[in-house]
Image (cartoon, rainbow, N blue to C red):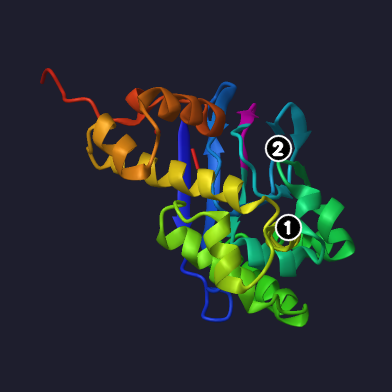
Amino acid sequence: MSLVMVEAPPSRALAPYVTRLAAYREDYGEPVARSEMAMPGVVLVLGLGGPMEVNGVRMTSFTGGLGDRFAATRVTGASEGVEVFLTPFGARRLFGMPMRELANLMVPVTDVLGAWGLELLERVGEIDDWGVRLAVTDTLLACRIRRSPEVGPEIAWAWGELLGSGGAVSSRVLAEGLGWSHRHLVSRFHDQVGLAPKAVGRVIRFGRAVRLLQQGRPIADAALKCGYYDQAHMNREFRTLGDTTPGQIYPRPQVSGLAH
């Protein structure tokens, strides 16, 4: 039973659009089911081995959009490949399509990248050395993203405000800061991010709460810090976004002597 993963920092050209770039190999000897937490980004998996089940569908290489619910995966055999975490704007430029069309979906890579996606998989699959595999992936992704139109700075600013506030800033404040109507703000978010600002804020807040709990912050304190109404509200959000509870995240003390 094993999972081996090697990460490489994205190049300067790719760094604005990718937060994580890793090669992996996993073989557990038996089927393993996982619940993948919602996150403020897009996953691109370039699978080079056997398929896995993603929300009940068998796929080898897949991607999708931002989601405001967890994804269920099941690994049934040995697999390896490259895993890329894209920012919403990196995904928007890489895919060249409105991100609302991929919200809460996972689809085969070729559904969104077509022939270029097939070429990407072939190029990456020809390489055995993991470091070279990651470098080639980096170069190919950066080249395609650079050739696509840039997104406007307005939603990037609003996204930064959401991240900086831990998901707490309201849609009203964002719209006022841009001089837009709320309807226009939501429309632009659906195009460039995939979810409305309120839903994005929930995902960001959830991620912040998870990190606080992992650092040992008491559950009640994390709930207050992240702006949950009460612990029951926090529990509901953890179930929806992560298929978990705060108590399952919070580290328990040892009484004697969480892949991907």
Q: Is the magenta region chiefly helix, strand or loop?
A: strand
Whether residue 81 is in magenta: the answer is no
Using residue 157 as the reference point, say whether residue 57 is left or right of it. right
Q: Which residue is drawn at 46% across and 35% down?
A: 2
Q: Position of residue 135 (x, y in %)?
A: 58, 71
Q: Position of residue 238 (x, y in %)?
A: 47, 30
Q: Foreground residue, 41 or 100?
A: 100
Whether residue 18 is visible, yes or no, is no
Q: Which residue is drawn at 77% across and 49% down?
A: 102
Closer to us: mark 2 or mark 1? 1
Q: Is residue 260 above or below residue 135?
A: above
Within 10 Å of disc 2 (Cα), the crowding (few <14, some 14-19, many 20+) is some
Q: Is residue 184 above or below residue 100?
A: below
Q: Foreground residue, 76 or 99?
A: 99
User: From this viewpoint, which residue is outermost toward the top?
Assistant: 256
Task: Tell me the magenta residue range.
Answer: 72-79
Q: Is residue 135 above or below residue 37?
A: below
Q: Is residue 200 above or below residue 216?
A: below
Residue tagged by mark 1? Answer: 183
Q: Which residue is drawn at 55% across and 74% down?
A: 16
Which label belongs to residue 256?
none
Q: Foreground residue, 192 or 46?
A: 192
Q: Which corner quadrant of the image does residue 188 belong to?
A: bottom right
Sequence-wise, the earlier of marks 2 and 1 is 2
Instruction: Give, as a three-letter code, the residue at label 2.
Output: Gly
Q: Foreground residue, 74 or 216?
A: 216
Using residue 19 as the reference point, say whether residue 137 is left or right of it. right
User: From this viewpoint, which residue is outermost toward the right?
Assistant: 115
Instruction: Give, as a three-letter code, the residue at label 1.
Output: Arg
Which label belongs to residue 50?
2
Whether residue 82 is visible, yes or no, is yes
